[in-house]
Amino acid sequence: MPNTHFSTAAVIAEFRAHGAEPTFTSYTGPSQRLTFLCSCPDRRPGETTFRALHHQGVAPRCPECRTLARQGRMLGNRRTPSTPAAPKAAPPTDRDGVIAEKYRTLLAQHGVTPLSEYGGARTPIIFMCPGRECGGARHSIMPAALRNGQLPRCPSCQKAARPRGAAHHRWNDERSPEERENDRSKAWEVAVLRVHDMRCVITGRIGRAPHHLYGHAAYPEFRLLLQNGVCLTRTLHDEFTARHRDGRNTYDDFATFYAEKTGRVCPILDPMLLRISERVFVE
């Protein structure tokens, strides 16, 4: 399966960062056997996978260098005569106070003043979110999450601060704009089917055809709007698109189609009537 997380240039750069010189010319996935020249003076050839290098932290070395490193670890693990251990330092008198000060410092580094003190590993620390998305919502964070690098923010502010596009760590320069647009369209289709529980809004039967109320040919700004999608059966979707092959259909066209099939007024809200703050776009 082609790798979509790392480009060939990124893989070559990581090999060179360890002193090895890659001899492969293409990269297809983390299990591919990749050849290289070792960083030893003899520049002997070697072979490894990107999974071992990047995910498991195994440096790219030739078989001879790996053997020497293994022998060095075996010698280092031999037992040596024990020496008297140094006396342990006395623990601090106010251990809870020291831990509480540690978490106050962590929160202060992110510009947050806690509303509650540290009460144990299983007790969340309450704080007032300093983000702009929520306007200062009251939220909480577990001590372990704060210690592991999670930002003390509410979910909406965390989502707004998440790196996107080329700044994201999984961004792949080799993908074309058409491929990325297709990925977003597929994500929109999956989200629409999930919202409607894969039930056709007209027949109530299982439906697997997501449909745009406002056709994306005339309304491209609504192409990824979640409220602009409904679920139909394949038969009904094919019948509707046969009437509007130009892709410029509107909500009124669908309301007419719904009334024709059911004899009732369409209960689905017109996406045009939604406020901007109520619109949900699939990323």
Image: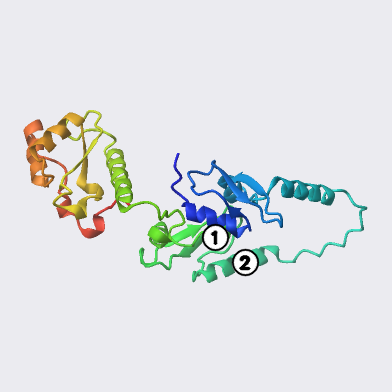
> Do we see residue 3 in this rendering?
yes
Horizontal placement of 276 versus 127: left or right? left
Q: Quadrant of residue 253?
A: top left
Q: Is residue 62 above or below residue 207?
A: below
* Within-10-Å neighbours for mark 1: few <14, some 14–19, many 20+: few
Q: Position of residue 133 (x, y in %)?
A: 35, 64
Q: Residues within 10 Å of mark 2 (few under 14, many from 20)?
A: some
Closer mark to the observer between disc 2 and disc 1: 1
Colour option used = rainbow
Residue at the spot 70% in from the left edge and 63% down from the top edge: 95
At horizontal 57% and vertical 64% (from top left) the residue drawn is: 117
- Residue 232 x %, y %: 20, 34
* Nearer to us in this view, 231 or 75: 75
Extreme residue toward the front, this view: 42
Q: Label 1 is placed on what type of residue?
A: Gly
Picture quarter containing residue 39? bottom right
Residue at the (79%, 49%) spot, across then down: 73
Look at the picture and state if 43 lies above or below 92. above
Mark 1, secondary structure of its residue: loop
Q: Are marks 2 and 1 in contact (CB under 8 Å)?
A: no
* Residue 146 image position (x, y, % from top left): 55, 60
CA gap between label 2 and label 1 equals 14 Å
| Side of 191 where 82 appears, left or right | right
Q: Which residue is mark 1?
A: 149
> To which residue does mark 2 refer?
102
Quarter of the image with the N terminus is top left
The disc placed on residue 57 is none
Q: Nearer the viewer, residue 189 or 49?
A: 49
